[in-house]
Amino acid sequence: MDYQYVDGRLQVRRTDEEKKPILQRLKRIEGQVRGLQAMVQEDRYCLDEVQQMNAITAAVREAVLQLISSHLDASVDYAAKSDDREGAIEEMVRVLRAALRQS
């Protein structure tokens, strides 16, 4: 993972290996959404559809946690290597605040 601090924001660049589990999860979510669309088209039982929506929501939440994890790791590394502890903490809080809005 590589990062740079630009315009008061930490820009994280993940390696292909770091992107792989995130992209796999997103592809799984994409498949779940397609499955849900088919369920709606087929007039499946409502609770089955709701259960699928809940599974999608949980999967998206996990994807968010994966993204946050790498970003916080970069923020901590940045804080340790620079004199800008406050800026790193502000960045972490900004990311966590955005994630909490998603829930």
Image (cartoon, grey):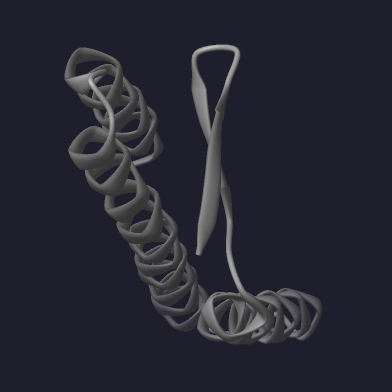
Q: Quadrant of residue 97?
A: top left
Give the residue at x 50% y 64%. Answer: 1
Percent position of residue 13, x then y: 61, 55
Residue 48, compared with residue 40, is above or below; it is below
Percent position of residue 36, x then y: 65, 78
Percent position of residue 57, x then y: 42, 63
Percent position of residue 48, x then y: 46, 83
> Which quadrant of the figure contains the C terminus?
top left
Q: Nearer the viewer, residue 17 or 24?
A: 17
Left or right of residue 31: residue 7 = left
Give the residue at x 61% y 73%. Answer: 15
Give the residue at x 52% y 85%. Answer: 21
Q: How many numbered marks does the figure carry?
A: 0
Left or right of residue 91: residue 27 = right
Residue 78, compared with residue 8, is above or below; it is below
Q: Nearer the viewer, residue 6 or 54?
A: 6
Q: Quadrant of residue 55?
A: bottom left
Q: Nearer the viewer, residue 2 or 47?
A: 2
Residue 98, compared with residue 35, is above or below; it is above
